[in-house]
Amino acid sequence: MKLLIIRHGDPDYSIDSLTEKGWKEAEYLSQKLTKLDIKAFYVSPFGRAKDTASCTLKKLGRTAVEKTWLRELQVEIRRPDRPQRDSIPWDWLPQDWMKEEKYYCYDKWMDTKIMQDGNIREAYEWVTMEFDKLLKEHGYVREEHYYRVEQANEDTLVFFCHFGIECVLLSHLLNISPMQLWHGMCAAPSSVTTVVTEERRNGIASFRMLSFGDISHLYANEESPSFAARFCECFDKKEQRHD
């Protein structure tokens, strides 16, 4: 089974939709996706994800199943450098979170006081539980850190969602802390991440990432990627996002 996890196009958060550039990205993405044999589409309830999906779905005459748990992760923390202000867990200074070794451990990253105060565990476990329910419907049942194969298949499932939740899904499939994905990877708007099952022994499957944040559909149309989700490459780049 193959999973395509797609971040929405360049967002206009003020109206929960896409910018003009985001609509272009969604159109170029559709040129890629309409060439594939896709079993099922799933989409976040948020407008920017549904709008990104709409270009592909319209061309194919298909619909997507809306899943509440695919919405952007609804959690906030208090960063040590600004304790009076709420922040999302993937917007955190590296010199602060990297001091804590637990954040590198797949089974300990939620145990720090900051994460406990933000009720991160409840949100993370709800999403991954619902995700596993869906995978079970498609023939793969979670057992510890791998999946029992009840119905082997080469189906392709597509998920239109958001960066934060994408990293949660990947951390669950790959058994790693999402902190390393949230802070060490960047999925540009409309990018496609691909993971596939590997069944090296009959009845036992694990997931392997084939590509992360693929934006070849943008380059094919000579469209530069959006800077959204990134921070300044050098501090003196005043026009780029700092904090």
Image: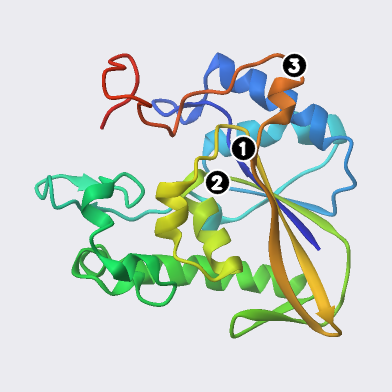
Residue drawn at (70%, 32%) of the image:
54
Tell whether label 2 touches label 1 (CB within 8 Å): yes
Are the two marked residues, 1 and 3, in contact with CB atoms closer than 8 angstroms?
A: no
Q: Residues within 10 Å of mark 2 (few under 14, many from 20)?
A: some
Instruction: Tell me which amino acid carries mark 1.
Output: Lys
**Few, some or many C-alpha atoms within 10 Å of disc 1 (few <14, some 14-19, many ≥20)?**
many
**Residues at marks 1 and 2, CA–CA distance in whole angstroms:** 7 Å
Circle nearer the N terminus (2, 3): 2
* Residue at the disc numbered 1: 50
The residue lying toward the viewer, choosing from 63 and 214, is 214
Residue under label 3, please give it.
221
**Spot occupied by residue 95 in the image (x, y as percentages of width and height):** 23, 49
Horizontal relation, residue 36 to residue 164: left or right: right
* Vertical side of 196 occupied by 93: above or below: above
Q: Nearer the viewer, residue 110 or 160?
A: 110
Q: Name the front one of labels 2 and 3.
A: 3
Callout 2: helix, strand or loop? Answer: loop
- State the residue at coordinates (82%, 82%): 150
Q: Quadrant of the N terminus?
A: bottom right
Secondary structure beneath disc 1? helix
Q: Residue 206 at what x, y percent from top left?
A: 71, 73
Picture disc at residue 41: none
The residue under label 2 is 45
The answer for how far apart the CA atoms under marks 1 and 3 are is 22 Å
The three-letter code of the residue at mark 3 reads Asn
Q: Amino acid at mark 2?
A: Pro
At 77% from the left and 30% from the top, the residue drawn is 30
Give the label, 1 or 3, closer to the camera.
Answer: 3
Question: What SS does tag 3 mark?
Answer: loop
Q: How far apart in space, not on screen, are marks 2 and 3 (Cα)?
A: 28 Å
